[in-house]
Image: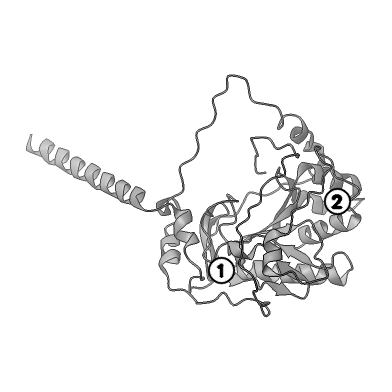
Amino acid sequence: MMATGRKAGRLAATLLALALATGAAHAEPPAKELFAAKGSPAALAPESVGFYSKGCLAGAAELAPDGPHWQAMRLSRERRFGHPATVAFLQQLSEEAARRGIWPGLLVGDISQARGGPLPYGHASHQIGLDADIWLQPMPAQRLTQQAREDFAFRSVLREGTLTVDDRVWTDNYRDLIRLAAEDSKVQRVFVHPGIKKKLCETAGRDRAWLNKVRPIYGHHEHFHVRLRCQPGSDGCTPQESTGSGDGCGDLGWWFNVALKPPPPNAKPGKPKPPMRLADLPNQCRVVLNAPGTGAGNPLLMAAPRDAAPAALSYAPIASVPIPTSRPMQ
């Protein structure tokens, strides 16, 4: 009887400790608030920790607002940080695209926060410094002011109210820029709207191997999303599954029929997911969050002078473009 009593006591103590730990975890603010509050990278060796949609970033580099062939947009969002390989990739892509006469310069959107982690709005991924958004608009000849970068309108490459690329906007240069990004060995995936993938399939020609990396996903008709592979030195990085083989063009039908079917009339709406807590992320992310900051992200090239107060804008979808409620990430 005494042994049974001791076991019951230990069980009660264990349950109490678990309850206290759970309560403490839920007492913490959501992880998105903790990471958004960090304005400088963690002074640690560069490393992507966890998965693209559940992780953090140590030792980030910062993309400068301006380079010879890029301009960073929406500066107020403070999402110009990435793994050094990502920042270098964007610089190299911009230079090579300009050298080949494909694209005068990139308008670069969100990469990651200074220490990665969940974002307050706009993305589920972009957490480990290996995702970057590139606008589907050539960089204008003039340098945009900070305020202009906040106000500069997104432009869809689809015909209004359709899922089809607008040939009044689209040229082969759009295809060639996406192809140039996809052919880089560091790139794991490139996400585009299904209508863009369809256009690429129709115009790719005989050399189609690069199409394997180009994956359809709704919401990507104003920008395309480049995802790099886990980089050397990032032992805690969780890779995404392979894209397999083939160009993926034969599977596009699903996106234009099944994905757009409305849910059954009596279907219950899905429950919103609770916000991610620090305890939900890899343990190393607590170290990243609490590490001293570098004080700067070592931006590539000199930053242009800031001359206006920013306004917060998000990647809001254009209302005229159909978007299904379910968006599987291939």
Residue identifier under label 2:
208
Judge whether residue 79 can be spotted in this image.
no
Characterize the local packing of mark 2: few (<14), some (14-19) or many (20 or more) Cα atoms within 10 angstroms: some
| 198 displayed left or right of 329 | right
- Give whichever of 101, 152 is nearer the camera: 152
Numbered-mark total: 2
Is 103 located above or below residue 275 in the figure?
below
Give the farthest residue toward the bottom.
Answer: 302
Local secondary structure at mark 2? loop
**Which residue: 88% across, 58% down?**
173
Percent x, y of residue 120 = 52, 53
**Which residue: 88% across, 69% down?**
100
Characterize the local packing of mark 1: few (<14), some (14-19) or many (20 or more) Cα atoms within 10 angstroms: few
Q: Quadrant of the N terminus?
A: top left
How far apart in space, not on screen, are marks 1 and 2 (Cα)? 32 Å
Is 58 located above or below residue 134 in the figure?
below
Q: What's the coloring here? A: one colour
- Give whichever of 8, 30 is nearer the camera: 30
Mark earlier in primary sequence (1, 2): 2
- Give whichever of 1, 320 is nearer the camera: 320
Question: Decide: marks 1, 2 in contact (CB < 8 A)?
Answer: no
Q: Quadrant of the C terminus?
A: top right
The amino acid pointed to by label 1 is Gly
- Give whichever of 76, 285 is nearer the camera: 76
Judge whether residue 288 can be spotted in this image.
yes
| 301 displayed left or right of 138 | left
Residue identifier under label 1:
233
The amino acid pointed to by label 2 is Arg
Local secondary structure at mark 1? loop
Percent x, y of residue 22 = 32, 46
Percent x, y of residue 195 = 80, 42
